[in-house]
Amino acid sequence: MDEQVIIEFSDFSFQYYSQAEPTLHEINLKIHRGEKVLIVGPSGSGKSTLGHCINGLIPFSYKGAITGSLTIKGEDTQKKDIYELSKWVGTVLQDSDGQFVGLTAGEDIAFALENDNIPPEVMHERVRKVAEMVEMHYLLTSSPFELSGGQKQRTSLAGVMVDDVDILLFDEPLANLDPATGKTAIEIIDDIHQNSGKTILIIEHRLEDVLHRHVDRILVMKDGRIIADRDAHTLVSSDILVETGIREPLYVTALKYAGVDVSPEISPGYITTLKAEVTQTALTEWQDKIQSPPAKPKKPIILSLEDVHFSYDGIHPILQDINFDIQEGEIVSLVGKNGAGKSTLSKLICGFEKLDRGIIRYYGEDIKDKTIKERAEIIGVVLQNPNQMISKSLIFDEIALGLRFRDVPEEEIQERVEKVLKVCGLSPFRSWPISALSYGQKKRVTIASILVLGPRILILDEPTAGQDFRHYTEIMEFLEAINQLGVTIILITHDMHLMLEYSPRAIVLAGGRIVGDTAASVVLTNDAIIEKANLKETSLFNLAQMSHIPDGTRFVQRFIDYDRSVRHQ
């Protein structure tokens, strides 16, 4: 046996007992000690199932039929129990809330050590060291549920690192993080890899964000098979990402639009390694050919916030001096770091919370006396966490629920529900129990349950979190289609690609105040706004700078204009 191989799949297949077909087909894969491997693929490709096989959730929690073999550290995993495997593989889940067991961050980090009956003085020292490594040492006494999304992720990371496992498995680590925190998370993972030599596996939709730091290999999965195993330069130079439905890095898309031959010779796998000296002429000539679209005529103000203030306890302000107007039919992104007040603002608009001061107007009318039910007739909201919205056991019934409350005829309900099932990519699952769905699929159910009601204003909190590129595109194209019918859309998002591609305007919150209300291209090229709001520069701006294009903001806007024209052809 090769001592350097830490994980080995040999002709490995797995079929859930509840499924008619195998989810994994004849996987042959070797991962070496100390490697850092990224696993990408569309929803349903089998990448999470592959991770579950490695960490022992399969076959101990999720039952099914296994053929072939999987060995970790040279030992057959089917001859081990899940406790033994947990000493080799530490997992950081996509949903951090589902991983917490302690009353404080410190207790949560110490959980594995308590199970092993480690002496308290040793335990405290190990918890302190690992908390410092992930910059959580000053929050050890905080409740996990008072933490931001990024802090929760760091706590989960510390909780698996404290046991000194050989392999760290990250399942969608960026799903609920703001851009700057996501960037920091990738840096922390890379630092751990560099300093500890641990084997790192990352399962993630957001390829470009993970490629903020080097990875040794990228595995691409589709239909339960590994269809590519390549380094970053070779992969982004191929057509595999586009053909598989995985979003390629934005700067790579820009290079292709400009007619640049994207090949391994120009090292395009990371924006930091790109040989930009060969791209300048092509990018400059391409940018100069792009025409700006005509300005849209002004429309009536549908939503207006005037001098809005709010605090939960009457002492600590959450929102201050919020003023903005949104025109009928606009698509606007509301962005900012975790805890900036974005979700609170949506609660105020919907009436879930009451203003301390200020006015919210709908077509000029103060809506303070409208009940939540009355506001729901005109304003629909899709929450970030799908589990907070779901109340029925079957998908069809959940989506139909709002229509049935409104006494809509069953024939019309059937027609409207079937339409949004198709748009949201849920038609194959229409009769499924919701408990059988993934986190991303549940998200689509909640979006469908609001879209079916036909609101005038639609607020979506992280509408594409956990979605692969195909379903992301389907959802956003559907939102664009209903926007064309006059529905005004507010997107609360950490996804800067979404903001750039689909919302011409962005309102930026930081510390409960508006720090920017301008074009998306300006937001992601303005250092002051980026720093205040925990955002990060778009790689398009980095590409412009590296290629010595004088006006990076103009270049980003030209890309957006061209990309929209391509999508709408």
Image (cartoon, rainbow, N blue to C red):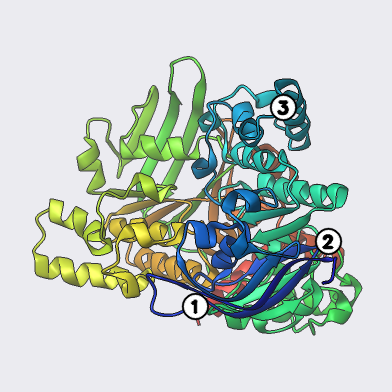
Name the residue rendered at 69%, 68% in the picture.
249
Residue at numbered disc 1: 568
Q: Residues within 10 Å of mark 3 (few under 14, many from 20)?
A: some
Name the residue rendered at 37%, 34% in the picture.
348
Q: Residues within 10 Å of mark 2 (few under 14, many from 20)?
A: some
Query: Disc 3 marks which amino acid?
Result: Met
Q: Are marks 3 and 1 in contact (CB under 8 Å)?
A: no
Residue at numbered disc 3: 123
Choose the circle earlier in sequence order: 2 or 1.
2
Rounded to the nearest whole Å, what is the CA distance between mark 3 and mark 1? 58 Å
Rounded to the nearest whole Å, what is the CA distance between mark 2 and mark 3? 48 Å
Q: Nearer the viewer, mark 2 or mark 3?
A: 3
At mark 3, the secondary structure is helix
Q: Are marks 2 and 3 in contact (CB under 8 Å)?
A: no
Query: Disc 1 marks which amino acid?
Result: His
Choose the circle earlier in sequence order: 3 or 1.
3
Q: Residue furthest front?
A: 79
Q: How many marks?
A: 3
Residue at numbered disc 2: 545
Query: Disc 2 marks which amino acid?
Result: Gln
Query: Is residue 15 placed above or below 162 in the rendered structure?
Result: below
- Pinpoint residue 439: horizontal percent, then vertical percent: 45, 56
